[in-house]
Image (cartoon, grey):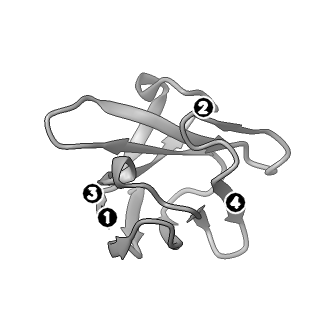
Amino acid sequence: QVQLGESGGGLVQAGSSLRVSCAVSGHSFDAMGWFRQAPGKERDFVAAISVSGSSIYYADSVKGRFTISRDNAKNTVYLQMDNLKTEDTAVYYCAAGRLSSRETLYDYWGQGTQVTVSS
């Protein structure tokens, strides 16, 4: 059974950094993605990384501030978030599936971790 578990969310001030992690159990060889959902809004794509890490994609809104990475030996994917803005406040979800910005191409999802950025 594939399980994804996010951790590392929290409350931070604008301009600071935070790293969220996603531990995967039961399955290893998938592309991984991060999505986020702000209150009252749809879930949006944030970043995705291929199995090898050689292909990486970012949403325009986070490009240059967020970095996705993975450690296949630890079955863990990370999202390093720098220069956080209040508009980054959301529940962050990791997902495993096909490399894409479309959430419908991801088969497995974590439960989400809250990231709140205060001004």
Q: Secondary structure at mark 2?
A: loop
Residue kind at label 3, given as amino acid type: Gln
Say if mark 3 contacts mark 2, CB within 8 Å. Answer: no
Q: Nearer the viewer, mark 1 or mark 4?
A: 1
User: In the rendered view of the protein, which quadrant contains the C terminus?
Assistant: bottom left
Nearer-N-terminus badge (3/2) = 2
Q: Position of residue 16 (x, y in %)?
A: 50, 73
Q: Is residue 55 left or right of residue 77?
A: right
Nearer-N-terminus badge (2/1) = 2
Q: CA distance from mark 3 to mark 2?
A: 24 Å
Say if mark 1 contacts mark 3, CB within 8 Å. Answer: no
Q: Position of residue 86 (x, y in %)?
A: 35, 54
Residue extending farthest to the front is 119
Q: Residue 110 or 17: which is nearer the viewer?
A: 17
For residue 56, the mark is none
Q: Secondary structure at mark 1?
A: loop
Q: Which residue position holds label 3? A: 111
For residue 60, the mark is 2
User: In the rendered view of the protein, which quadrant contains the N terminus?
Assistant: bottom left
For residue 119, the mark is 1
Nearer-N-terminus badge (4/2) = 2
Q: Which residue position holds label 4? A: 69
